[in-house]
Amino acid sequence: TQWSMLCLQNVSNIYRKNAFSRLLRGVQEFAVTDSTTVRPRNANDKIDLLPLERSLHVFEEQIDFSLEATVPDPIPFEDKLRSMLESHKDFVVSAEQHSMGHNLLSEVAELTVIGESANRLDTEQEREQEQEQQKEIKTKREQQIEVEKFVEREYSRNEERPTPWPVRMLGTHPASLKFNTGVNEHPFYSLSEFKLLHQDSLSFPDSMMISRNYFNPQWGGLRRIKNVIAVMEWAPSTDGEQCRLYTADEHIQKSQINQDQEAALQKMHTLLSFHNGSDGRLTLDGLREAVIAATNHRVSDEQLEQLMSEFCEQKDLGLSCSELQSLLVSGRLRPEHKGRFWVAVSLAEAETLRRLVHVRTTKPLVSGSSCEMALHVSMQGSDTGKLLDTSSSWKGKSTGSTLHESSLAHGLFRFYDGDMHYHRATLTKLVRALQRASRHQREQFFLTTISARRRMERKWQETPLATVFTITDEYMALKQRAQAAFVRQAVQMQGLSAWEAFMVFDADSNARLTPAELYGALKWLKVPDLTAEDVVDFFELADSNRDGMIEYQEYMQLMEEPETQEAQGDTEEEEEDQEETARDLPPKIEPYGADELREIMVRRKRVELDRLREDHAKQQALQYELDLKLYKEELLASSRRAGGSNPRVYHPGIDENVLEVYGELHKQHRMVEFSFYANQHPLRTFASGKNKYVPILIDEVRKNLQPLKCKQGHSMSRADHWGWCKVCNDNYHLLHIGCFKCWYFACNRCSKAHEEEQVRERSDPNGKSTFLLCEGGCELTLHVPPRDTEQGAKGATHVEGRFSVTIEMKLNTLPAAGQLAAMVRFSTPDIAQSRRLHKASIYMDDRGVLGTHESLASMHAAHAESKTSGEEGAKSRSSKAVGGPEWKEVTVLGVEPGTQLKSERWTVVTICVDVNEASLSVFVDGRLSRTEQNIDIRDFALGQKIMVLGGGKAAQAKGGALRRVFLHDYFAETEAAAIYHACASANAAVGGKLQRIQACWRGRKARKQLVADGFTIGKPTMPKQAQGNENEEDEEEEVE
């Protein structure tokens, strides 16, 4: 910590000061060999008697890269400081220094003893906080993986095969074709019309287009977007008026300036004309700064003279604000062509177009047309791309496009492609080209398009792209650049360098500028018409990392000229002259207006937070609606597949034949089935741990294996003699089985390999009825279909707050004694409520009892109290499960006997929730296990997702096997038995066993009856006591 570093520094200073003094006195001894020229030592001065070489070694710090074999034991901090003093005791020469060291050690020892207990508590709290943070980070990563898997699974490529189009379309303007035919059949369309499914488009310049083979707006479903690699520069016609530069009047018609933009432009003109003008007009120097602010490029003096003569009525006086506005909107600084387009094409189209260019080297691209084209390669980090090939008329010369429109087109396609790093000049063009859309619309379009690409998640706030999403329009950017230009010129006029000005502005010498220090500096520089709002605007421009302070690096970036960005070139020279110029610096400038600036910044922050809060709420609502629409599209698409959709929604009035199997109430209510018996996850199902699909009859894979047969199909018998194996043709060894008719023998290895091949084939889940086996730590998240996906279910009824969930499952193991296993969670985790972040809705204890966390805890407390008081609260008996460990069935108060869950057995659990009555009922295999009242309804608020085999802490996910999960829109108390019988009869691992058990039971009853009747059919007559014993025995066997 910082305190520890200060203690180390204080202790080392005690002896290092003396060593440094000895070095200063004896510096000549290192260079002079003649002892007569060396200054004589003073025997009474203890510092002169210190060894010179050891004084130098005091400042050495050893660097050791060796690693110890074991983790070293931590050394107490007090012992470390004491060892430092003892190892340099010769350099502690005075009693005052000894006392200082003793006081330091005493203070450290005292503070160490006081802080030991607090450190233990803080360490435990920090460990718990770190674990919670790691859990949250893991959850966020899993959610990102879940979204990525979902997008990957539902990504469609249907109808994406390239569609050929005639070459003559290159000579046809898209707008004219649409106007003439009424139907746009052109292979290119405007980029402003591009949008993803259920998303909004963004306004781009009219020259930006996209090919239908690159992305067709008629494609349905979820789509990924290809990277923009090939860009075609295209002119449908190069004749006269068809391809020319826009006139000034045409530029003015496209430019509409509002009141706020006029105010920003007026402020820019005032700032630039203060030092570079007269009577409120811009001279050539002021015009040069205005052009640099608008284009980020320098212009020659001849070009400035031409602009001045073209737009200034009184050239001697300078450029007025209205004349500057006319210059900016005239297109003179940013020339663009009419009839020239930039098209993003697919790679297949680019390959064909380049072949066309090479074939038509001496002929026009289209007969009877003057169309021209050029192919460019769009590259990240490049503002103009790379020219790949051109048509014949543009061959060997420029395509005729201006530098502005070329860099603008490639910059916009890079923005569409999800790039986040641009040069400052390109950012200026992007802000101007996209200013018709709001900052929120730009951000939403960028985020939605980049989410449809295979890109790693990055924060645009930390990249240069943040300028596009934070600056409203080009006039606000011009105002901010004019402020920076004014400060640069004012500092130069004061005769100060950038570093010197920073030292003067920094009143408290902490290498940072506060808003008040900036306000004082701007007033000292005499900024005209300066207001507190202007200071805050300028401060927000400079504070790029948004930490509330302007650091030196941010200050230097502000002082750079936009084009060169080479202000760091003089840094070394400034540092060399630092000591000389420091004496001549003006006095520190006092901060000004701290309270006023704080009020403005707080007000803006509140407005920004309110806007962000409102945007976040709107974004969540839109995202929720979008998610519902996308899920509806997925369910509709999956319903057309073989086997139907998964999850499958059963609608009353449509699926009555199916619903009748699960009970009478299903005819009036909806039911959703999540199935795992087809070797495939339901839509949007996410598993957080290891899981795999296993055939339902996995326990019987080694039963009834077919023995190896000879080539004639004869059965082979045991043969124990030496010979050649006909299967593997191996060496002479002992044979295991053989056919004596065909004299065909096989060794033991081949016989076992034949059996293992059958086991592997039976264990393969493909094409078989399966279940999902989840290991410990794995929990499933199921996405509930929205109710608006129902089709034709007009007669369906739904009672809000009442629902049921049925799970067909098999537990791997019961939790250890005193522990709980998380089973189901209905409510969605809320990050804001960290206490409820890892709490499930339903748990299971070590006795197989299901319930809420509170009820199970109270049951265990009551059980412990009854044991301590000597009361017999439970009785148990032991038996052995087939193939499983010994288990105990405990009769618990409040739980029906025989309804506890057991490991390694298929069980159907139905959980009925009534949120309105705050009640809960649990059914196990169709029998009521227990009920609860006054449950916490926050844990049972059915959300958009359900978590099964988990929902609590990671250690509480014990795993298990799942076959089906049902969600019912009603309280299924009366239908629990029907649901159980329907699930059990459809489960091959349970249904067949039930049939065999029933057949054996009927046969046993029949045999008993025949024996009792003396082989005559009829009802036996037995004593009442015998009948009672027989009935009790039958009941016990029925339970078994």
Image (cartoon, helix red, strand yellow):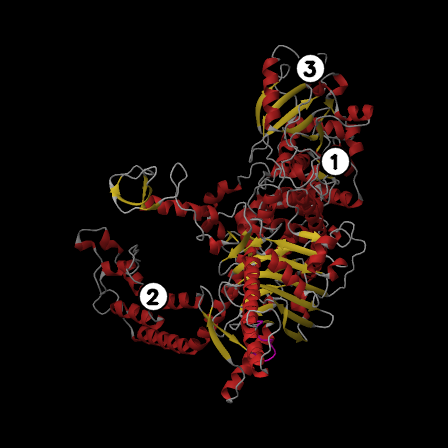
Residue that badge 3 annotates: 366
Q: Position of residue 24 (x, y in %)?
A: 30, 58
Q: What's the magenta region?
A: 892-900
Is 958 on the left-hand or right-hand side of 28?
Answer: right
Q: Residue at x 24, y 40 (%)?
A: 732
Specify which label sits upstream in the sequence, 2 or 1: 2
Which residue in the protein does label 1 denote?
324
> Residue 75 got which mark?
none
**Dot 3, how many residues are within 10 Å of its Cα: few (below 14), some (14-19), or many (20+)?**
some
Q: What's under tag 3, amino acid-wise? A: Val
Mark 3 and mark 1: Cα distance apart in space: 44 Å
- Give the left or right position of residue 284, taking residue 860 as reference: right
Three-letter residue code for mark 1 = Leu
Pointer 2: what residue?
12
Which residue is pictured at 81% across the width and 24% down the height?
181
Q: Secondary structure at mark 1?
A: helix
Picture layout, residue 458 above or below residue 356: below
Residue 424: percent from left, percent from top: 60, 39
Disc nearer the start of the sequence (3/2): 2
Instruction: Name the side, left or right, on which 675 lies relative to 199.
Output: left
Judge left or right: residue 127 versus residue 182.
left
Q: Is residue 948 visible?
A: no
User: What is the distance, in whole Å, between disc 2 and disc 1 at their CAs?
Assistant: 65 Å
Chief secondary structure of the magenta portion = loop
* Discs 3/1, front: 3
x, y percent for residue 341: 69, 26
Give the vertical position of 156 relative to 105 (above or below): above
Q: Nearer the viewer, residue 716 or 467?
A: 716
* Amino acid type, callout 2: Ser
> How busy is the neighbourhood of tag 2: few (under 14 within 10 Å), some, or many (20 plus)?
some
Report if the CB atoms under discs 2 and 1 are less than 8 Å apart: no
